Amino acid sequence: MIDGKFAILAIESSCDETAAAVVLDGRDVRSNVISSQIDIHKAYGGVVPEIASRHHLDNVNWVCQKALDDAGARMDDIDAIGVTYGPGLVGALLIGLATAKAYALATGKPLIGVHHIHGHICANFIEHKELEPPFMALVISGGHTNIVEVTDYNKLRVLGGTRDDAAGEAYDKVARVLGLGYPGGPLIDKIAKKGNPEAVEFKRVFLEKGSMDFSFSGIKTGVLNYVNSEKQAGREINVADVAASFQQAVLDVVVAKTVEAALSLKKDKIVMAGGVAANSKLRAMLQSACEEHGLKLYHPSPILCTDNAAMIGCAAYYKYQAEGADDLTLDAIPNLSI
Ligand code: KG4
Ligand code: ZN
């Protein structure tokens, strides 16, 4: 216990961030250490799983120690260990999970396995102390695009997801086609501000009526075809216009479906989560759609949108309250469903 509150040391290593945090009573973040590998993977234009695992292994011990130090805590003060066990890259997940199990075994403290998406949603509880379920969540990241009905802290129901690429993946691939670099989301966010979102008409894919699923691979191919045909015709590409038009096509669909989901299931709050939730245009569009329909919008600050362990500590707290601890046979599940 720290200051009379239940203290969780949380670890996250599902992709390319090695992260650890100390979180009290779910919402009080005492430390949040993130060691990002973005600069390493940049050279390859995306995350290389083998390299990610190796760097997690190099970093996980000092990241955990720094999380304790930054919180002014010792292992004795910690009540439980929370850790992401899926979904994610299996080799990457295993490093965090093995570390968490080692701490749990050595200290006799409970181990709490956390679903990465549950963590992303819980980032909002840290940011907005008054926020409580029920609400509709849009989870939008490099690995996921889901509309999730949240009826309680630990009760999630997935209403729809992507049938091909995640939104962040489409951003990253389109950025590569446009020669912008990696990760593409923030770069498209920035350059699109200078472009005309109506310059190129990319197809909006809504799928069947009422479906809350997404498909972004068509838009991605649309951008590729457009760029190739313009090049063949000897015309110069206006990167800002293409980026703005791509983004508008993706976000028109995302915003419409999220608002429709909230209205049809009578939720008065929408919560954003995941790396793409940091996107300025998405925030602005969703905000005005929410105002139009009398809904309240919540999103975490950018540092809590992308992968971090504070959100895992929050989710671990609520999971432990509802379900108790996991045992040490807990395994990494790369395609863990909610
Ligand atoms: O949540 P996250 O850190 O990792 C996953 O769980 O996937 O999300 C990373 C994704 C990347 O695809 C990145 O390009 C995207 O989030 N992203 C953004 C922005 N910031 C990060 N996409 C659009 N606009 C942004 N500002
Ligand atoms: Zn994530």
Image (cartoon, rainbow, N blue to C red):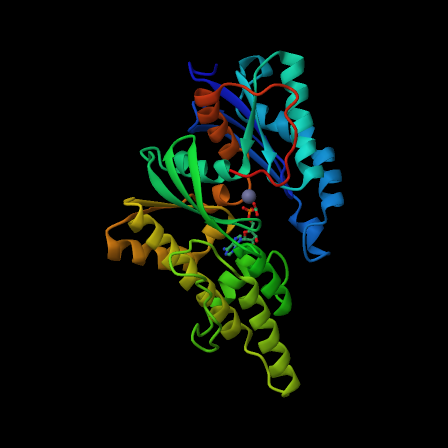
The answer to whether residue 46 of the structure is visible from this angle is: yes
**Lateral position of residue 41 relative to residue 126, left or right:** right
Q: Quadrant of residue 28?
A: top left
x and y percent of residue 306 in the render? 53, 45
Q: Indicate the quadrant of ligand 2 in the picture.
A: top right
**Lateral position of residue 113 relative to residue 193, left or right:** right
| Count of labels in the image | 0
**Residue sitting at x 49%, y 40%:** 120
**Residue sitting at x 48%, y 77%:** 200
Q: Quadrant of residue 235?
A: bottom right
x and y percent of residue 209 in the render? 39, 60
Judged from this view, the residue extending furthest toward the front is: 208
**Residue sitting at x 42%, y 29%:** 27
x and y percent of residue 97 in the render? 65, 28
The answer to whether residue 284 of the structure is visible from this angle is: no
Q: Front-most of 293 and 257? A: 257
Q: Quadrant of residue 330?
A: top right
Q: Front-most of 128 and 331? A: 331
x and y percent of residue 94 in the render? 69, 32
